[in-house]
Amino acid sequence: MSDADPKQTLLDAALAHVAFDGWSDATFEAAIADSGMDSALAHALCPRGAVDLAIAYHKRGDAAMIERFEAEDVSELRYSEKVAVLVRFRLEAVEDKEAVRRGTTLFSLPQYAATGAQLVWETCDAIWNALGDTSDDVNWYTKRMTLSAVYSSTILYWLGDESDGHAETWAFLDRRIENVMQFEKAKAGFRKSRLGKLMQGPLSILDGIKAPGAKRDMPGQWRG
């Protein structure tokens, strides 16, 4: 990464140690030593040490996913295929599977579980934004929740996949995406059904749920 970004320089130095020591204090101190960075600067950049580097590593992958998606011609793909290809691009951005495995372990710890969930949410948010999602109601949340489940299960499958070119992972991903599309079709069918029409009144309360905007501090907004 660019020398202009000291955190990325520190991250590059850390990756050589993650496979052996995980995202740990030992890895962080080794990264400081290997990069020749001033210790005070390193701790200022990463107050939580290697945890902050693990976060930076995840966000690096998100950026690589979007960069590749914007560079490739996916115009002939169906919408569901574009979702799947973005998840695939995200996993293929990983150069060291062990770094992800260690990160999964880190973010499964109680004190970091919320951070891990937030990172997954941000990845899925980036995917929907890349696809031009314009939803501004409860669907903004359900889309990201559903994709978060797909993405998380695909990562776990991918971590244990030893098939050639991760072929079994991509087949697993396609099945999960197909399940999501079937759910969306069922949801649309319910809304058009007699029962769905009868439930329009009680369900109208969901219309007050709005997606977060650039000027909102809370994760969402209620409009009564």
Image (tube, helix red, strand yellow):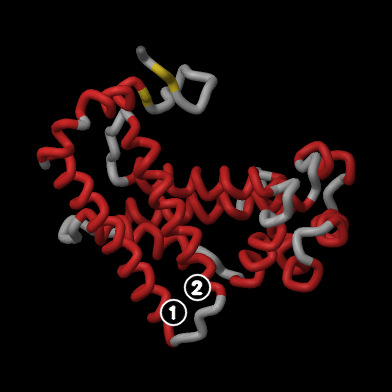
Asked whether the residues under the numbered discs 1 and 2 touch, taking CB atoms below 8 Å apart as contact, a structural biologist would say yes
- Residue bearing mark 1: 166
Q: Nearer the viewer, residue 174 or 35?
A: 174
On the picture, is 52 further left or further right than 30?
A: left
Are there few (<14), some (14-19), or many (20+) residues within 10 Å of tag 2? many
The quarter of the rendered structure image containing the N terminus is bottom right
Residue 8 circle label: none
Q: Secondary structure at mark 1?
A: helix
Residue 154 lies, in percent from the top left, at 46, 66
| Earlier residue among tags 1 and 2 | 2
> For residue 158, which numbered disc appears in the image?
2
Q: Most extreme residue toward the top, as rendered?
A: 224
Which residue appears at 43% of the width and 46% of the height? Answer: 145
Residue 81 appears at what percent x and percent y? Answer: 25, 61
Asked whether, in this view, residue 6 is left or right of residue 173, the answer is: right
- The percent position of residue 124, horizontal first and vertical second, equals 43, 48
Residue 43, picture quadrant:
top right
Q: Classify the position of the C terminus by image quarter.
A: top left
Q: Amino acid at mark 2?
A: Trp
What residue lies at 32% left-to-right and 23% top-to-bottom? 205
Q: Residue at x 44, y 79 (%)?
A: 166
